[in-house]
Each structure stands twice: as C-alpha cells, then as structure tokens.
Amino acid sequence: MTSPEREPSAASPPGDDPIASRPTVSSADVVLFRAACILSVVGMLATILASAVFARRFWLRRAATHAGIKVLRWIAVVAFSAVLAMVLWLVPSSATEPSLAAMASDAQVTVTETSDQIVLAPSGTPSSVGVFFQPGARVDARAYVSTLRPLAEDGHTVVIPKQPFGIAFLSTGAYNTARADHCPVNRWVVGGHSLGGTVAAIDAQSFATASSDAVVGLLLYASYPATDMSTLTAKVLSISGSNDRLATPEKIAESKTMLPAGTTYKVIEGGVHADFGDYGPQTGDGQPSISPDAARTEITGATLEFVNSLGPVL
C-alpha cells in the first residue's frame, strides 16, 4: 500500500483569545530556557571552532614529529570528533503541529510549562487518577501534547517531564518527585514512548504497592520493559504500530512474557514509531500506511478508555 503524505495537520490554537490561551510560563522559566538555549549553541560552536583550529594546526605542520606526539594528536582528533558527534546526537527532535497548537490553554485545559515539566490540568474538578508520561529518547516533551491533551479534557491531570539531555534514564526520579504534587490525584498511570516506556515500567514496579500515590496503570507506547514484570499488580496497556521498524511487532511479541498475563495489546495497523508523537519522521523507522491524524485518534482513544477504566472522575 502506498503510504500517505506525512504532512502535519493544520490546527488552530484552542480558544478565541490569543493572550488568554497562552501557556502559563513565568519570567524566570523564560530566562532559564533562553539561557539553556544560548549555552547549548555556544557549546556547540565552541566545540566546532576548537576542532577546526586543531585540524588546521595538525595539517599545516608537515615537519617530522616524535611518534608519541603524533599518537597524542590522533587521540585528540578522535576525542574532538566524538564530542562533536555527541553534541549533535543530543539535539532533540523538535515538536511539530498539532502539538504546538495544543500547548495553548483554553476553557477546558490549563497548560503550564516550566523548565522541567509540562502539566495539562483540567479546568474542572480533576479525576483521582493522573497520568505521568515519559517522552521518547531525544524527543521534545511538547511533541506528545496533542496525543495526551484529550485525557486532560476528560478530567485527568497529565504531567510530561522534560528529561535532561532528552534521555529518559536521566529522569528516573521525576515521577517520585511529582506524584504528591497534584491533589486530589492519588492514583497514577505511568507511561512513556519507546525508551520512556521502559523507564515508566521501572516506576510501575517501584510504586505499584506504594501506600500513597500508587501506580495503578502502565501505559506503553511502542515500548516494552527491560526486566520481567509478569507479577506486576498494576494494569497494563501496550500500544504499538504494525509498521514500526524500531519497536517492531516481533520485539513486542517477545516482550509479552515479561508483562502480566492480563495485559491489553492494541496494534495500530499501518502505524510507525513516530506516530506516537508529533516530531516528524524518525531515522530507521518503517513506512506508514495510515495518516498521522488517524493513528493519533486510535492511540488517544485506546489510552482514554484505559485510563478511565482505572477510576471515575471525581
């Protein structure tokens, strides 16, 4: 089947008042964000400049040099190259539409963005069940807002952490920090996309039997656990894409023995790895045979049904 065009959906920001609908961001958060961006750019430029200067000096010096010095030069070349490659690798995939438009607050949902998280809070009385969602590796946290916003519209508080360097394993303590900060939420669904789901599974194991703010559900988007979780007491929903070449159907099938027997599996026919967020195509992914909007609708629908099954809105 010929894959559909992967153009981002046109979406207008919710609400009529563009000023009132902006996400709540303090001036301190703006300053911190801009400072981080500037430092990142300066760091990248400094690394590139240092590499260029070193390379020029290395190639211009033709005179015979002691063998040990030559070895040190080559080590320095490799080290500079490795640092540059790492800096470029850590640049996250930017969020695209419709998630950028979904960042706007309206009468139903208040969006609050700080330096370390995004919170989607329902305007009415929130459900006792909240959702804590870990982004995929090196993906802008905002990329998941359009997929998860319907949960907030239905009454569930949603928290999306901003991971250090975009790596979920560097954000393993984020749920423990946030879980008691959102009264009246006292039960949580932890979830994530790809590597984010693997980290969410660790939190599910750690907090499923907690005396307060326990994990009652685990949500896996194109993901699977790293260890055996077959005895987990929390409910589990696994959503995957049939055309995903990263978290392939074979890998999802192999991981079933590590999840509880009652796990619910949902396959998005024609879906790929990048359908779970709005950040554009992903290297190594498969070819989709479903539109991004159709895939998102299925993902959101299954997620909402799962979360609602774990507790009523207050």
Image (cartoon, rainbow, N blue to C red):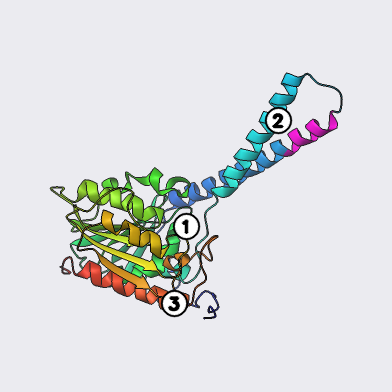
Which callout, 2 or 1, points at the residue further toward the start of the chain? 2
Point out the image quarter for the C terminus.
Answer: bottom left
Q: Where is residue 55 in the image (x, y as percent from the top left)?
A: 76, 36
Q: Position of residue 159 (x, y in %)?
A: 32, 57
Q: What residue type is labelled 1?
A: Asp
**To which quarter of the image does residue 187 belong?**
bottom left
Residue toward you, 309 or 244: 244
Q: Residue furthest right?
A: 63
Q: Which mark, residue 293?
A: 3
Q: Main secondary structure of the magenta part?
A: helix
Looking at the rendered structure, the secondary structure element under dot 3 is helix
**To which quarter of the image does residue 189 belong?**
bottom left
Looking at the rendered structure, the secondary structure element under dot 1 is loop
Q: Which mark, residue 140?
A: 1
Q: Which amino acid does label 3 sit on?
A: Asp
What residue is shown with label 2?
Answer: 74
Name the residue: 43% across, 57% down. Answer: 141
**To which quarter of the image does residue 78 belong?**
top right
Of labels 2 and 1, the one closer to you: 2
User: Badge 2, how many Cα within 10 Å: few under 14, some, many 20+?
Assistant: few
Q: Is residue 76 above or below residue 143?
A: above
